[in-house]
Image (tube, grey):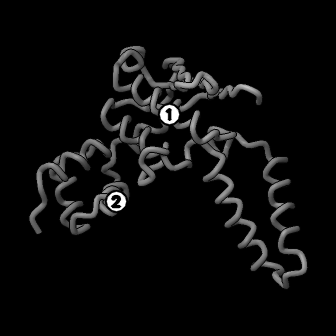
Amino acid sequence: MDISAIKVKELRDMTGAGMMDCKNALVESEGDIGKAKEILRKKGLSKADKKIGREANNGWIIDYIHFNGRVGVMLELNCETDFVAKTDEFKALGKDICKHIAMQNPKYVSRDTIDSSVIEKEKEIYRAQYEGSGKIGQALEKIVENKLEKFYQENCLLEQKYFLDESKTITDMIKEAIAKLGENISVGRFVRFEIGQ
């Protein structure tokens, strides 16, 4: 199978893996970028995944006010060095995330930041919805877990699909930036303001 250099470069930009590794992964996946990314991850060749655990103690506070002046967002975006924090690519990523927050209104950064009482309350609601349906035991718990996954995807910033490109999540966008900039990047926190709320 013939793989174009453009496709190889696209995969390299997303993962930070070497050119030949990217080409081999694309050949193995028959040109499917999503599968190729997974192949690279399984082989441990995705540099972005290796950088995720590193400390990100620098960064930038990025803000966005929607054109109508009714919604505003402030975001703490972290990285490893002050040098990367000052780059246009880093700030552009932050601005894109801020716009996403303004449009999608996530409640939490990630599932790790949700208080356990909120999760238990959600589970209680889901179980109550199926009371009397005949679903019990493991079948009911599977339904509750599936509904909880959907709750995370709708309410956790990092798990939401990017509002301008639903083929990737905010986590995917951050991993792409990590691959390009060569440092770990993470969302510290955010706040969203809306007139009347």
Labels 2 and 1 touching (C-beta < 8 A):
no
Task: Kindly identify the amino acid type of the residue bearing the numbered disc 1.
Answer: Ile
Most foreground residue, 53 or 27: 27
Taking the spot 33% from the left edge, 29% from the top edge, the residue there is: 181
Q: From the viewer's perspective, tell me whether residue 118 is left or right of residue 6.
A: right
Q: From the viewer's perspective, tell me whether residue 70 is left or right of residue 170.
A: right
Q: Is residue 36 above or below residue 170?
A: below
Q: Position of residue 9 (x, y in %)?
A: 19, 46
Taking the spot 31% from the left edge, 56% from the top edge, the residue there is: 40
Q: Position of residue 126 (x, y in %)?
A: 81, 65
Task: Kindly identify the amino acid type of the residue bearing the numbered disc 2.
Answer: Gly
Q: From the viewer's perspective, tell me whether residue 115 is left or right of residue 157.
A: right
Taking the spot 41% from the left edge, 41% from the top edge, the residue there is: 175
Residue to which mark 2 is pinned: 34
- The label on residue 21 is none
Residue to which mark 1 is pinned: 97
Find residue 196 and report its image quarter.
top right
Which quarter of the rendered picture does the C terminus lie within?
Answer: top right
Q: Pointer 2: residues within 10 angstroms few (<14), some, or many (20+)?
A: few
Q: Position of residue 114 (x, y in %)?
A: 73, 43
Q: Pointer 1: residues within 10 angstroms few (<14), some, or many (20+)?
A: many
Taking the spot 57% from the left edge, 35% from the top edge, the residue there is: 101
SS under mark 1: helix
